[in-house]
Every structure is written in structure tokens, then in C-alpha cells.
Image (cartoon, grey):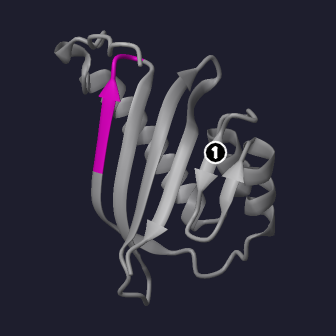
């Protein structure tokens, strides 16, 4: 096993206010699109690559095309949710992680969502996502 390299992101570049504001704004766009089932915006915000992945509460999706097909086939009802905790952390100007806890309207179960965002030439895109429900 190769030795671990030292961090190359100076502490001053973690949660830079300008980058954090950008990621919070794009995350808000994602959340609005998700609960409104705006598939076009959701598709736009995921990296269009076979390397993109999304682990859902009941599915493992590898590649943008699988994620897109899932979104197109998903029922559009009962998508409303309340975000109960949120933490976004940025690293430099090009990478961020977003974590939330949520509750679906009418449910007591706690959901969790993690996303890795990367600034691509076309803008911020989700490259990896994980959604799970606590039992």
C-alpha cells in the first residue's frame, strides 16, 4: 500500500465564502427540482458520465444513463420532504460535499442524503450520491 499523501487543500480554502455560497445555491436548486420532480433540472445537475453513481434507498445506479432512466420511471407523487439537518463543506474551488437529514411528509422515518459535487466546465455537478433511510 502506498503511503498517504499530505493534504493539498490549505485550511483557508475550506468553506471559502464565495464557493460555499455557490454550492448552497446549486444545492437549493437541486432540492427544489427534486421535490417538484423537475427531471430536466435533476438531469442537468448530475455529471453526464458512466462514472457517476447514485445509491438510493432501494437501488444502486451506475452511470448517468441509469440515473436518468430511474428518474424518468419514478412515480412523481409523495416527493415532498423537510430537510431537518444540512451541512455543506467545500474544499478549494472545485469540490464540495453536501449532507442532509430529511423526513418525507407524513413519515417519521429519517432519511439521509450525501452528495459529492465537483465544479465541471459546465458548472457544479453531482458525481456521487447516496440516499438511505434509518430503520
Left or right: 108, with 31 as reference point: left
Q: Quadrant of residue 73?
A: bottom right
Q: Quadrant of residue 57?
A: bottom right
Residue found 65% across the figure and 22% down from its top: 122
Left or right: 63, with 15 as reference point: right
Left or right: 1, with 63 as reference point: left
Residue found 47% across the figure and 38% down from its top: 116
Q: Which residues are magenta?
A: 87-93
Q: Is residue 53 magenta?
A: no
Residue found 36% across the figure and 75% down from its top: 110
Where does the image place residue 17, in percent across and percent down from the top left? 25, 25
Residue found 32% across the figure and 11% down from its top: 5
Q: Quadrant of residue 3?
A: top left
Residue on which disc 1 sits = 53
Tell me the chief SS of the magenta region.
strand
Left or right: 126, with 87 as reference point: right
Where does the image place residue 48, in percent across and percent down from the top left? 73, 34
Observer-nearest of 110 and 61: 61
Where does the image place residue 78, in percent across and percent down from the top left? 58, 81
Observer-nearest of 107 and 82: 107
Q: Quadrant of the C terminus?
A: bottom left
120 to 39, vertically: above or below: above
Q: Is residue 92 magenta?
A: yes
Residue extending farthest to the bottom is 106
In what element is the residue under mark 1? strand
| Figure disc tally | 1
Q: Quadrant of the N terminus?
A: top left
97 to 32, vertically: above or below: above
Residue extending farthest to the left is 11
Please tell me how crowded label 1 is: few (under 14), some (14-19), or many (20+) other residues with Cα within 10 Å. Answer: many
Observer-nearest of 128 and 27: 128
Amino acid at each position: 500500500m502506498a503511503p498517504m499523501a499530505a493534504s493539498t487543500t490549505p485550511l483557508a480554502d475550506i468553506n471559502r465564502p464565495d464557493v460555499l455560497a455557490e454550492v448552497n445555491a446549486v444545492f437549493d436548486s437541486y432540492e427544489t427540482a427534486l421535490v417538484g420532480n423537475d427531471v430536466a433540472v435533476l438531469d442537468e445537475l448530475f455529471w453526464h458520465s458512466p462514472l457517476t453513481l447514485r445509491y438510493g434507498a432501494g437501488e444502486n445506479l451506475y452511470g448517468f444513463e441509469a440515473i436518468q432512466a430511474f428518474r424518468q420511471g419514478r412515480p412523481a407523487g409523495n416527493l415532498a420532504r423537510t430537510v431537518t439537518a444540512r451541512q455543506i463543506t467545500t474544499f478549494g474551488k472545485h469540490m464540495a460535499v453536501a449532507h442532509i437529514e430529511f423526513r418525507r411528509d407524513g413519515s417519521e422515518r429519517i432519511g439521509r442524503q450525501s452528495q459529492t459535487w465537483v465544479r465541471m466546465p459546465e458548472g457544479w455537478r453531482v458525481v456521487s450520491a447516496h440516499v438511505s433511510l434509518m430503520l
